[in-house]
Structures are given as C-alpha cells and as structure tokens.
Amino acid sequence: MTSKPLDYENLNENIKKCQYAVRGELYLRASELQKEGKKIIFTNVGNPHALGQKPLTFPRQVIALCQAPFLLDDPNVGLIFPADAIARAKHYLGLTSGGLGAYSDSRGLPGIRKEVAEFIERRDGYPTDPELIFLTDGASKGVMQILNTTIRGASDGILVPVPQYPLYSATIALLGGSLVPYYLEETANWGLDVNNLRQSVAQARSEGITVRAMVIINPGNPTGQCLSESNLKEVLNFCYENNLALLADEVYQQNIYQDERPFISARKVLMGMGLPVSRELQLVSFHTVSKGYWGECGQRGGYFEMTNLPPKTVEEIYKVASISLSPNVPAQIFMGLMVNPPKPGDISYDRFVKESNGILESLRRRAQIMTDGFNSCRNVVCNFTEGAMYSFPQIRLPAKIIEAAKAAGKEPDVFYCLKLLEATGISTVPGSGFGQKPGVFHLRTTILPAEEDMPEIMASFKKFNDEFMDQYDEYAGYSRI
C-alpha cells in the first residue's frame, strides 16, 4: 500500500524530535488511572485553579461584565457589581471596536499595551514604548514567536538553562535549531555560573553552532531560584560581550517566597548599566496572567516587550503576528487588569489585597512544607523554593533501582515517578524531562495543592519513597545532606 502524506513515517522530522514532558508519559498514565477511578493529584503542571486556587474576585467581575455587556444596562447592576468593576468594564469595552467578539490589532489593543508600558515604568523606573509591546495568547506563544524569529536553521543555537522548562527544548527542536545547554549548579542553590556559560558557548562554536540568544528563567522553572542583581549584571555583560540577544522569561515575578532576593527585571538592570550596554544589548522579556496570585492559565494572556530591536525587525515580528489576526481579546483585558489592579481608595482594593496576599502567603508556607517534607525522606535532597511554583528534589537512586528501570525499558527517574503515581496517585514530572546532569535524577512537582492537603500528600510521598528505597539494599551507602 502506498504510504500517505500524514502517515507517521512521512511526518516532519522536527515534530518527532519535539518532546514535552509536562504532558508526557506520566501525565497520560495519570489520566488513564483517573478514568479507572483512582484519585490523582496532578502536580505535573503549574495550573493553580485546577488544584483549588480561587479566582480573584475583581478581575472576574470585570470580565463578566465585558462578556455580557447588556448587564451594564440593567438598573440593578450596581446591586451585584461594585462601581469600580462597572467603571473598569466600560473602560475596556471602550478600548475595543465591537466588544470581546471582535478582532483586535495583531499586537493587542493599544490602550492595554499602554497600560502594560505604564506598569513596566512603575516597576523598573524607566519608560518603555507601547509599540514595542505585543500581547500574546499566554507567554508561551510569545516565546515561540521570538524563537521562530531568531532560529534560521540547525546551526543556530540558543543557550538554555538546564534544568529548563521544556517549552524551550520542544520549540527549538520544532524549529530545527540547536539547544545549547548551560548547567545550573544545584549545590549552590541552582546558581548561574558565567564560567559555565563561557564553556557552553565555546563548545557550541567548536561544533559549528552560532549561538544567537540566551534564555534565563527568573524565578526559575523547575528549580525555583531567584537571580540576584549582581548575577543579572554578569549575564547581561556576558550577552553583550558575545553578541547574544537575551530572552528573559519572567512569568513568575510575583511568586517570591523569601526576602533576600526580591524579583528584579532584566530590563531594569540593563537600563541601569548605562551606555553602551543599555543602548545596544537586545532584550525580549515575557510575562503572563497564568502565574503569580492570578493563576489564570486557561485565559491564555501574556505579553512580550522588546528592547533595542531595530524597527525593521519589529515590523517582521508584527507581520508574523498578523497571520493569526489577533490575540485572545478577553485575555488582553485580564492582562490590563493584572498590570493595572485596584488602587488604594477603590471600592474593591481591600478585598483584592486580602485575596492576593492570602494566596502568596499560603504559597510561601507550602514551599516550606514541601521542602521540609522532601528533605525528611531517604535518599532525597531538595533546595528551598525561593520563587516560582515548583519543587525539584534530587532522588538518589541506588544502582539496583537503576537496573530495574533499565530492565523495564524506562529512564530511572521515569520508572521512579511511575511507581510513585501507581502507589499514591501523585502525578509528577521526571527530571529528565527538564534536563539534568548525567547520572543525577530528579522529579518536579508543583507547590500548588491546597495547604490543608499538603501534610497528607508529603506523608504519602515519604511512605512510598522510604518503602521503595527499603526494597533495595544499597540505601545505606548514600549519605544524607
């Protein structure tokens, strides 16, 4: 029989190379078990509302009115919605040309891009141009757009932190580029060493790869570290010296669980470095409504901001964005609400602050509960989650477990995570899906399960882990840290 164009053997080879572990084998097995009636705790993806986080009231009120504008004509609308939500809904509807059902500009609504620019100026102390801000369907779409703009072929490399969020490895593979890894140092709380960057670039160049851009994820995913100002300066100088564009994934900037290293944007540090770096280094920064205390993953709202990109490049990026006509309009309004929330004196301000602070304070406690829980387990060591939404413990697997995994045709950390899932219903992601040093094994889990459930989840994990290790004789050969 003649093979057909969409038969597997005839597919684009880049599609086959593309892997996305967050929704990979473990997730599919968890979904099967759930269908069979087993209770599954999906900690594989940073999806706050799916794990019980309540939506913030004010933005949902505004969106409800924008989605059903006829409610604004109801004389009783003020009995249900606060006056500031009504005013804000009218404001956003006034920015559209036909309401939420109409396409917007391919870059997003100009009025909301202006609000994003004002947010960036308040955050960083330096103005930005709304024309250099594109609203997107989540930060992921923005990352894909910029990588698509950057990668010209297999000899073009992108420096990516390892462990990394598989959006980067998957997209680079899909676009036919080359991922150039730089390893974060686990024993230094997942710190970034510029010497390692130099080695990675030198190695890539020796292999004929042109390194064109560097990715930072700050706060880190899956590692949870926060970059210091001095570390960011090192990175920016390195990119300047090596003629690299910097892609700053800053989607977790609201998720900070310690006071020593607050979030500082790459753009703020860049602008403070002065000429010539501040005028010449090319930077693209990404943000989203999916994370922080908003957690509005399903809304798919994000933006990217471009610094020092020439006008002709911006025109080309706009051309490609226009192929999709328009980003999701309701999500654009969510973005406007995120960057321009209720202010002191507004009717909804106190409730908004109480809800958002409550979420962040609980996340900080959950980060500590999870870190302590992992460190109480045999053969498990875990750095504290300084930021973002994840814990990334190292699982020190004895040789006999590694042999059993090999016999089962599985990577050792995949084998471990599958056994964990079957025994406890806890769905995680193996560290191999993010990249890790050879012979070192991890898993990633979110810190998002409800705070009241966290002790039971960690007890269940500890029971499984310690009993699993007990099945093998070599546990005693591993020291605790």
Image (cartoon, rainbow, N blue to C red):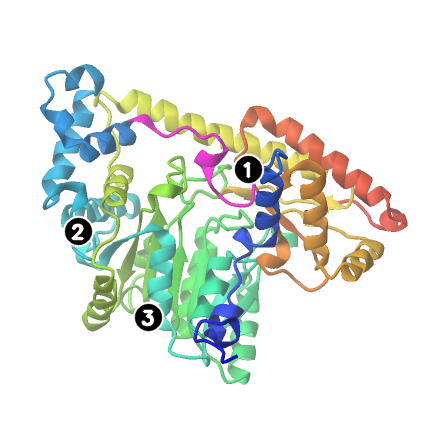
Q: Nearer the viewer, residue 411 or 149?
A: 411
Compared across the picture, whether 397 is left or right of 425 comes to right
Q: Residue at x 53, y 47 (%)?
A: 224
Marked residue nearer the N-terminal end (3 or 1) = 3
Asked if residue 54 lies in the magenta stretch, the reply is yes
Tell me the mark number nearer the camera, choosing from 1 and 2.
2
Q: Is residue 288 above or below residue 41?
A: below
Q: Which residue is mark 1?
A: 447
Q: Could you tell me residue 467's position as x and y percent?
A: 81, 39
Q: Residue at x 43, y 25 (%)?
A: 358
Query: Which quadrant of the structure image shows residue 323?
Result: bottom left
Residue 356 showing in the rendered view: yes
Residue reaching furthest right? 473
Tell me where the magenta segment starts and ends, as one range. 41-57
Circle 1 sits in a helix, a strand or a loop, which is it? loop
Label 2 to label 3: alpha-carbon separation? 24 Å
Q: Could you tell me residue 124's position as x and y percent?
A: 30, 48
Compared across the picture, whether 450 is left or right of 75 comes to right
Amino acid type, mark 3: Thr
Q: Which residue is mark 2?
A: 103
Q: Which residue is mark 3?
A: 149
